[in-house]
Each structure stands twice: as structure tokens, then as C-alpha cells.
């Protein structure tokens, strides 16, 4: 009798787990013919997300500041059979965002999912950071998120449905040394996203806050480096490309889309990011003390050096060797700037340095 009871109990648990998994799958939102707008989608994570949404049958609006990268992304997605509208847009400019949303709705009739993904990374000691560095990060990663959200929200509210996915960062929960402008903008974006979720709970519109750790998107090629920029790049590039420290772009994109389909309100990507977020939540003082010690080991600032240099311009043989695992990803996700052009942000900052 005892053995029979145990068998019955285990069978019941198995049936319950199977039923739960079945119901979970059924509860996931279908993306077939859904209209998805992804900012910053001409390269990197944004392009990986566009590929993932397209694999589920979604129709896409992609945008970016660089026309050349945007055209390459459109070709890649179209060749895979996606229905794509590609529009040039700088999300730090409110008028351009409003035009983007207007064109998207005119073309497809609606926007079902908004993914606020556009971002920039500026790496270096705080002594090298100018007000413009903070402003640039805030304009793109905070105000860019706010502009697109406020432009699309009335249309979603009118239809009483929609989903907003905000890509923030573990740097928005824990401020990482030598990423101060980036962390400030991500903290602001995370606060906006969490508050927006609470405000929209009763409206039928869902908000998912995504908190990624390091991802292998090839971003090291177009990040901006200040101070001893070659040393900064040599430290950042391997961390952003090695499998032990960074999750792959397709895997990250898959997790984000699945979280959106399940209606999750928060997703922290990578075990490393989850552990750091939990540790900081329990022991914030200890975390800050450890980060302070780490900051002591990072490169000092170059005296009177305020210029910014793209990753492509900060390479060295050693850094290239260490970052080799990320090269295929950088190629796959459009991170290489054509040789006859230059990263406009880096160029602008060097002009400011020369003034």
C-alpha cells in the first residue's frame, strides 16, 4: 500500500508538472502578424531581436542612426523572409521619434510591441567624462525611451492592448566603475520602466523590464573609450566577448522575446547578472566597497585627455587576440563600421577636444 501511494503521488506530481508546462505554453502570446517596433535595431542586440521576432512571424519596424548599417540590416531580414519597414531615426530627437511612430502606424496600421533598445556605451574614468558624455547617454537611453513610449502609448491605450519592452542593464541596478554616464542613464530608464509597469497594470498594456548583463553582440567595436583608451578597450573587449562572462546575442534575444510572450514584468539575463543583482540587494555597502577596490585596479585618466575613441580605433594585437571569440558576432550583427566612414559620436567628441 505504501509503495502504491508513493507511485500515485509521483504520478500526480508528474501529471501536474506536465499540465503546468502545457498551460504555460498555451498562455504565451502568439507573435504571428504582430507589428513590432525595435529602436537601435540596425546592429547588435537590436538586430538579434529583430531576427528573433521575425522567426515568430512578426512584422517589423527597424530603425537606427546610420543609414548604411540600417540598409544592411534590412537586407538581412528581408532575405530571411521578414516583412520589414526600415526607417532612419535618432531617438534622442523627439521630432524624429514622432515621425518614426507616425510612419510605422501609417504603414502597418498599428504597433503591437515596442522594444526600447537603442543605446551607447562610453567607457573610461570619471575624470575624463564631460557633461556632454552624460547628456548623450541620457538623451539616447533615457529620453529616447521616454519619447518612443509617449509617442506610441496613446495608440495602445486607444486599443487597450500592447506591450512595451525596455532594455535596461545590470548597470542600472549596480553602478559599475568606468561606466558612470552609461549607468546613470540606465538607472533612469529602469526607474521609468518599473514605474510605467505599475501605472499601466489596469490598462491592458504590459511592460517588461529587461536587465541584461554582458552580451556577445559585438558592441565592443562601436563603444566609445576615453582616457587610456587602448587599455580600457583591452579590458572591456574580452569581457564583452568571452563565453564565460557574456551571453550570446541569439540566446539573449530568445530569452527577451520569450519573456515578452509570457508577460513577465522583469527579466535579468545571465547568471552573473542575477547573482550581482541579488548580492547588491542584500549587501549594497559590501558591493560598493568591492567595486571601489576594483576601480583602483583600472587604468588612470590621461591628464588633459577628454577625447573619445571608438573600439575600432582602440585596438591592439593583444586585445584583438583576447576578443577573437567575438569577431564572428561583430560581423553577424553589423558592428563593423565601413572603412570610409567613422563613428560619428567619436568624431564629434574629438572635435570638442581640439577646440
Image: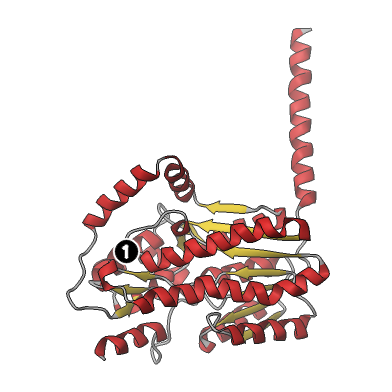
Question: Left of 165 or right of it: where is 281?
Answer: left
**In this view, 71 is above or below 200:** below
Q: Position of residue 27 (x, y in %)?
A: 78, 50
- Quadrant of image for the N terminus: top right
- Which secondary structure, mark 1? loop
Residue 333 visible somewhere in the drawing: no
Give the quarter of the image for residue 35.
bottom right
Q: Residue at x 77, y 25 (%)?
A: 11
Give the quarter of the image for residue 95.
bottom right
Furthest residue toward right: 159
Give the quarter of the image for residue 97.
bottom right
**In this view, 292 is above or below 231:** above
Furthest residue toward left: 303
Q: Position of residue 186 (x, y in %)?
A: 48, 64
Residue 318 visible somewhere in the drawing: yes
Question: Left of 224 or right of it: where is 192?
Answer: right
The image's colour scheme reads: secondary structure
Residue marked by disc 1: 178
Furthest residue toward top: 1
Q: Residue at x 81, y 65 (%)?
A: 160
Question: Left of 289 or right of it: where is 88?
Answer: right
For the residue pair 22 and 332, the one nearer the viewer reads as 22
Residues packed near mark 1 inside 10 Å, few (<14), some (14 to 19) or many (20 plus): many
Q: Residue at x 66, y 87 (%)?
A: 99
Q: Position of residue 166 (x, y in %)?
A: 59, 64
- Quadrant of image for the C terminus: bottom left
Q: Residue at x 71, y 71 (%)?
A: 153
Question: Left of 119 or right of it: where is 300?
Answer: left
Q: Position of residue 113 (x, y in %)?
A: 70, 68
Amino acid at each position: 500500500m505504501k509503495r502504491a501511494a508513493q507511485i500515485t503521488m509521483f504520478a500526480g506530481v508528474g501529471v501536474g508538472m506536465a499540465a503546468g508546462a502545457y498551460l504555460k505554453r498555451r498562455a504565451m502570446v502568439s507573435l504571428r502578424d504582430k507589428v513590432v517596433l525595435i529602436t537601435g535595431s540596425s546592429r547588435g542586440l537590436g538586430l538579434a531581436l529583430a531576427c528573433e521576432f521575425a522567426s515568430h512571424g512578426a512584422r517589423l519596424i527597424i530603425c537606427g542612426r546610420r543609414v548604411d548599417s540600417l540598409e544592411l540590416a534590412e537586407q538581412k531580414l528581408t532575405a530571411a523572409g521578414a516583412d520589414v519597414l526600415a526607417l532612419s531615426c535618432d531617438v534622442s530627437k523627439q521630432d524624429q521619434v514622432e515621425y518614426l511612430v507616425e510612419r510605422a502606424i501609417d504603414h502597418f496600421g498599428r504597433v503591437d510591441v515596442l522594444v526600447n533598445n537603442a543605446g551607447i556605451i562610453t567607457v573610461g574614468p570619471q575624470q575624463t567624462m564631460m557633461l556632454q558624455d552624460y547628456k548623450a547617454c541620457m538623451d539616447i537611453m533615457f529620453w529616447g525611451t521616454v519619447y518612443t513610449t509617449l509617442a506610441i502609448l496613446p495608440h495602445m491605450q486607444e486599443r487597450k492592448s500592447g506591450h512595451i519592452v525596455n532594455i535596461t542593464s545590470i548597470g542600472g541596478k549596480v553602478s559599475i566603475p568606468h561606466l558612470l554616464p552609461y549607468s546613470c542613464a540606465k538607472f533612469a530608464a529602469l526607474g521609468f520602466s518599473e514605474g510605467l509597469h505599475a501605472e499601466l497594470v489596469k490598462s491592458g498594456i504590459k511592460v517588461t523590464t529587461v536587465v541584461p548583463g554582458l552580451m556577445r553582440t559585438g558592441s565592443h567595436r562601436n563603444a566609445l573609450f576615453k582616457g587610456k583608451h587602448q587599455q580600457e578597450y583591452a579590458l572591456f573587449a574580452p569581457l564583452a566577448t568571452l563565453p564565460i562572462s557574456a551571453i550570446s546575442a541569439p540566446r539573449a534575444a530568445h530569452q527577451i522575446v520569450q519573456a515578452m510572450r509570457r508577460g513577465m514584468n522583469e527579466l535579468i539575463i545571465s547568471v552573473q547578472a542575477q547573482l550581482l543583482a541579488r548580492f547588491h540587494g542584500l549587501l549594497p555597502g559590501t558591493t560598493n566597497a568591492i567595486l571601489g577596490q576594483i576601480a583602483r585596479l583600472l587604468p588612470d585618466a590621461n591628464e588633459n585627455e577628454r577625447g573619445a575613441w571608438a573600439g575600432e580605433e582602440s585596438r591592439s594585437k593583444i586585445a584583438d587576440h583576447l576578443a577573437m571569440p567575438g569577431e564572428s558576432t561583430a560581423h553577424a550583427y553589423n558592428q563593423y563600421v565601413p572603412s570610409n566612414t567613422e563613428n560619428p559620436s567619436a568624431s564629434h567628441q574629438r572635435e570638442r577636444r581640439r577646440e
